[in-house]
Image (spheres, rainbow, N blue to C red):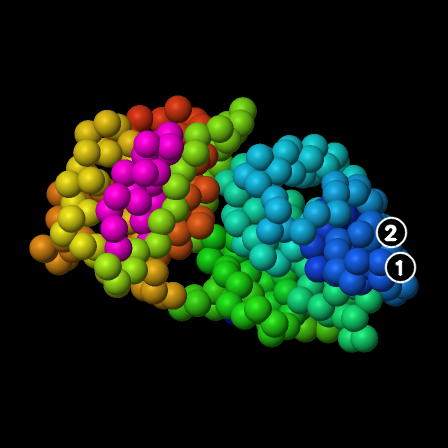
Amino acid sequence: MAKQAALAGTRARVVLLSTGGTIASRRDEASGHTVASVAGAGLLAQIPSLAELAEIEIEDVGTAPSFDLTPAFGHGLAARIRHHLARPEIAGVVVTHGTDTMEETCYLVDLLVAAGKPVVFTGAQRAHDAAQPDGPGNLLDAVRVAGAEVARGLGVLLCFAGQIHAARDVTKLSTVALATFQSPGLGPLGEVDGEQVLIRRQPPARRHFAPMALAAEVALLRLYLGFDPRLVEAALALGAKGLVLEAFGRGNGPAALVPVVAQAVAAEIPVVICSRCLTGRVMPIYGKGGGRDLAEAGALFAGDLKGPKARLLLMVLLAEGLPLAEIRRQFAELAP
């Protein structure tokens, strides 16, 4: 049975961390470009009724497009979130963020923040000055979730178009659709239905880490028909300390890739295999360069975790200084 939030009560105190993105973007008449330029107060000004729902404390982290952000930004954002969640008067935190990389920053924060209070990412597909912006509705829903008791203990969430998703599972499917964020094969954790926050399932297993920085570079390469393994060699030559390969189907690649993977693993460089498919798990089954050969060469398999998030998980584990054997164990637990 779904858990349901109460319809009314004392206003929750919620921190809004504004980082930019389409929700904060408007057309610049001089250049003709749409750019992120609206601070947190401007976002709230579009939703006068929000004051009846929660007391909002604004912290403007920046006004950047998410396609220009980095893992280091996510690491610093996680520190600000931990700071606010440690304050007893704060019920939860909402982060407004661009949609292009929201799923990655959201998952990275989920790996780095252990508090049980809700942390909710949201944004928009339409700009702040669009004729029918979707940002105000998304932000209103996100604040409602951040203040809801039923959202506690679920990890970092992404709230968009009325749906609530787990950071690990969610991905952006459409360049323009308003309900762009989905959790393929799993579905959302819940939804916002008017004033109600409904939770229908629990998130997958989670662990938390506290690296001082995310310095190790991890390369993400997507395989394609005729993939040249020299691209993997080039990534290693450029100093990559880990590799994530979005392989075919169940986790397969060309036969010429196998010795390159074996060489990397022999040098204690972890190689993670994901699938380019939208849903389903990787599993070492096939020979002649397939997943079985890659596994025997030392590659580890990341279950249904997709490439961009497997890269972040590997970056965090490397930043923790874990040996290859422990990295294997962590992937087996977090990406079964």
**Could you tell me the amino acid type at mark 2?**
Ala
Q: Residue at x 26, y 28 (%)?
A: 268
In this rendered view, identify the residue nearer to me: 126 or 202. Answer: 126
Outermost residue toward the front? 31
Q: Residue at x 68, y 73 (%)?
A: 193
In this rendered view, identify the residue nearer to me: 308 or 206. Answer: 308
Please give left or right for residue 82 compared with residue 307 in the image. Answer: right
Q: Which residue is mark 2?
A: 41
Q: Secondary structure at mark 1?
A: helix
Which x, y percent locates residue 279? 36, 65
Position of residue 89 relative to residue 164, above or below, is above
Asked if marks 2 and 1 touch (Cβ < 8 Å), the reply is: yes
Rate crowding at label 1 as few (under 14), some (14 to 19) or many (20 or more) other CA atoms within 10 Å: few
**Could you tell me the amino acid type at mark 1?**
Ala
Which x, y percent locates residue 73? 62, 38
Please give left or right for residue 6 compared with residue 43 in the image. Answer: left
Q: Secondary structure at mark 2?
A: helix
Outermost residue toward the left? 288
Which x, y percent locates residue 72? 58, 35
Q: Is residue 220 visible?
A: yes
Q: Quadrant of residue 99?
A: bottom right
Rate crowding at label 2 as few (under 14), some (14 to 19) or many (20 or more) other CA atoms within 10 Å: some
Q: Residue at x 60, y 68 (%)?
A: 163
Q: Which residues are magenta?
A: 227-246
Q: Is residue 284 visible?
A: no
Q: Which residue is mark 1?
A: 45
Which x, y percent locates residue 162? 65, 70
